[in-house]
Image (spheres, rainbow, N blue to C red):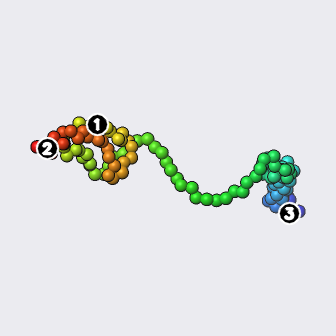
């Protein structure tokens, strides 16, 4: 009784803590009631119905990675492609941007000038 007369219009700390705890319990129960029984669409499988299309088996495999890009490639070492003789070009076998191999014929030169030089 002495405590009540000390703070006549004010509740004690224990009563405030108990009221706060009861309020949190009410909020938790209301939240479980409102949202607790619902499951978002797509989170569980529907009833097992027969498939309308054939099913396959998924397997894991490595696949090569290939990237195609547009750009300009420059060699690390400069290459001078030149003929050892002066002659007229008959055919061009490769075009700019094509891949070439070592020993591949790039152009065909006219042989008449070479034959004439050898005949002398």
Percent position (x, y) of residue 58?
A: 69, 56
Looking at the rendered image, the disc whose residue lies closer to the viewer, 1 or 2, is: 2
- Viewer-side residue, 41 vs 48: 48
Image coordinates for residue 8, horizontal then vertical, percent: 84, 54
Disc on the earlier residue, 3 or 1: 3
Residue 76 lies left or right of residue 44; in this view the side is left
The kind of secondary structure element at disc 2 is helix
Is the Cβ of the residue at disc 3 closer than 8 Å to that at disc 1? no
On the rendered image, what quadrant is the N terminus found in? bottom right
Dot 3 falls on a residue whose secondary structure is helix
Residue 59, position as x, y percentages in the image: 67, 59
Question: Quick one: label 1 or label 2, which is nearer the N terminus?
Answer: 1
- Numbered badge on residue 2: 3
Residue 16 falls left or right of residue 79: right
Q: What residue sits 84% from the left and 56% below the top?
A: 25
Q: Position of residue 103 (x, y in %)?
A: 32, 52
Front one among 108 and 18:
108
Q: Residues within 10 Å of mark 2 (few under 14, many from 20)?
A: few
Looking at the rendered image, the disc whose residue lies closer to the viewer, 2 or 3, is 2
Q: Are marks 2 and 3 in contact (CB under 8 Å)?
A: no
Give the class, few, some or many, for how many residues have Cα within 10 Å of label 3's Cα (few <14, many ≥20).
few
Label 1 sits on residue = 90
Q: Which residue does the numbered mark 2 point to in the structure image?
A: 119
């Amino acid at each position: 009784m002495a405590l009540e007369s000390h703070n006549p219009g004010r509740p004690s700390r224990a009563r405030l803590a108990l009221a706060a705890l009861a309020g949190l319990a009410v909020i938790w129960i209301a939240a479980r009631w409102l949202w607790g029984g619902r499951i978002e669409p797509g989170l569980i499988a529907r009833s097992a119905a027969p498939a309308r299309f054939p099913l396959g088996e998924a397997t894991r495999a490595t696949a090569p990675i290939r990237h195609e890009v547009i750009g300009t490639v420059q060699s690390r070492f400069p290459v001078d492609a030149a003929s050892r003789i002066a002659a007229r070009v008959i055919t061009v076998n490769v075009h700019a941007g094509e891949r070439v191999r070592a020993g591949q014929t790039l152009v065909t030169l006219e042989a008449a000038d070479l034959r004439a030089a050898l005949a002398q």
